[in-house]
Image: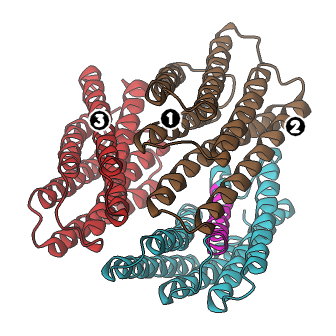
Chain colours: A brown, B red, C cyan
Amino acid sequence: MFGLLPKDEAFFDLFDRMAGTVHEGALLLSAMLGDFTEVEEKAKQIRNVEHSGDHLTREAIEKLNRTFITPFEREEIHELVCRMDDILDSMENAANRLSLYRIDKPTPDAIALGKVLVNCTELLRQAVPMLRQIKKPQEMLNLCLAVHKEESEGDRIEQHGLAGLFERRQDPIEIIKWKDIYSDLEQATDRCADVANVIESIVLRHA
Amino acid sequence: MFGLLPKDEAFFDLFDRMAGTVHEGALLLSAMLGDFTEVEEKAKQIRNVEHSGDHLTREAIEKLNRTFITPFEREEIHELVCRMDDILDSMENAANRLSLYRIDKPTPDAIALGKVLVNCTELLRQAVPMLRQIKKPQEMLNLCLAVHKEESEGDRIEQHGLAGLFERRQDPIEIIKWKDIYSDLEQATDRCADVANVIESIVLRHA
Amino acid sequence: MFGLLPKDEAFFDLFDRMAGTVHEGALLLSAMLGDFTEVEEKAKQIRNVEHSGDHLTREAIEKLNRTFITPFEREEIHELVCRMDDILDSMENAANRLSLYRIDKPTPDAIALGKVLVNCTELLRQAVPMLRQIKKPQEMLNLCLAVHKEESEGDRIEQHGLAGLFERRQDPIEIIKWKDIYSDLEQATDRCADVANVIESIVLRHA
């Protein structure tokens, strides 16, 4: 059933483009954290990537509403696309906040969270095209498992960052700023794990 | 199929009453922000409106669970009602916080967010009754688009407010308070955009 | 239909074990708040309970994906299990934060919220096994109503706690810490109310 019908291709192409857009956003955010110059300009680029994601999401949902036979259940497609869009939203929030909060210099924990996001979204970018023909279910489940491991690493880094904020008795305004930024970055990894869950569920049902 | 069966009317009446309740909440919240006196009394009025919304939501869900043939898919009705209820929850949070946090005087950005909420909920109040017979799909989609534009304006205002908090080097407790209140108000506009998404989806499927 | 098929038993057993795990987590968290010693060790125990919950959730979802005929609709089972898992997540967040934020001594409001969580999860632990054969729908709905009442009490306590933080003009870092911990605890009671909603919905559809 998979890949046989030409009309399905358009859905899979949209998924691929969305996964690529998500990974592009993560690369830009990680680069911004690593080289914290021209911050407003870099935040704007990330906002543009997020807007591209919005258009792809809207295109997929409209297509879904107009298509009678879909390659997976409607709800699975809806979830897959909306959860990828959520990753972009969290990354945009992080980028905006880094600019709005007039951050001086990213902490090592924030830079590490940016790298975790690059890893998560690279794994998703590999897994999503394999939805076309679920020939290698175990390989796909392994990619999802790797996303969950990265997400746990993200949790660990956020907790390390938070502990650092409250250990050193420091400026409350710095605590406010970094707590929010760590939270945005960690939420982006949570959203990656949500996408991995959707992929797992599709694989288990359709393999 | 729409509007032909008398039993459907009861659902549409519930939707209309819910949209009216949401708009009433927005008007009260905006009035409270504009004239910041008798704050506890005004917060209580908004809590009462939120409770009315809870009763309508519960009534709709019970009706949904007992009705075999529904005017739209069950999930669409469930989403429509629950997302309208979410708008009321966010507005109640904002009102409670304005009272609990012993705010002295609303900022211009908070007052502007209150007006955005009035605009969003007025647009929804116009769109919801048009679900009865989807005769003018384009007009409905235009109302939804206008909600999304208001929501973007809400984002812009929140970001302006946040930047202001961190620009002026000020009292961390003031930052804590306003960050939360801006967030509640902006979340209420996000929930309006969620309702607009549900309406769009119903229009695209059933027009 | 309920309880007749042996394969259903496995689902109900999973639900019961999950409800028991959630209650165990609440007991540990409340005990930790009541006797605030060996905090890191106690937080670790709660993390372990949360991991058991993750395994049960995953087991239930995999079973759901592989089972053709389920005792309730798939979505109801999915919601029931995922919302119970969310309770554990919120409780784990609270426990972690109590440890990470280097809290000195829980406030009376935090201790009271811990007791509300014990009450909520005890009510759910009683209601969940009654899903097997919905013979006493009114009794089940009463248990759910009692959860909603506890959740309102949780709201009231959180608001009392927040008002206290901002009344006494105090250390902004203390405000930051307690606002987050109250929020985690109150969110756990909200998630209990979500589970009560799922149970109500199942009862109304299947009784």
Q: Would you place residue B125 above or below residue C29 in this image?
A: above
Query: Foreground residue, C158 or C130?
Result: C158
- Residue topped by disc 2: A142
Between circles 2 and 3, the one closer to the viewer is 2
Q: Tell me the amino acid under the disc marked 2.
A: Asn
User: Which label is found at residue A92?
Assistant: 1
Label 1 element class: helix
What separation in Å lies between label 2 and label 3 (alpha carbons)? 45 Å
Name the quadrant of the C terminus of chain B: top left
Q: Tell me the amino acid under the disc marked 3.
A: Leu
What separation in Å lies between label 1 and label 3 (alpha carbons)? 34 Å
Between circles 1 and 2, the one closer to the viewer is 1
User: Label 3: few (<14), some or many (≥20) within 10 Å?
Assistant: many
* Residue A105 placement (x, y as % from top left): 55, 42
Observer able to see residue C72: no
Name the quadrant of the N terminus of chain B: top left
Residue C87 belongs to magenta span: yes
- Residue topped by disc 3: B131
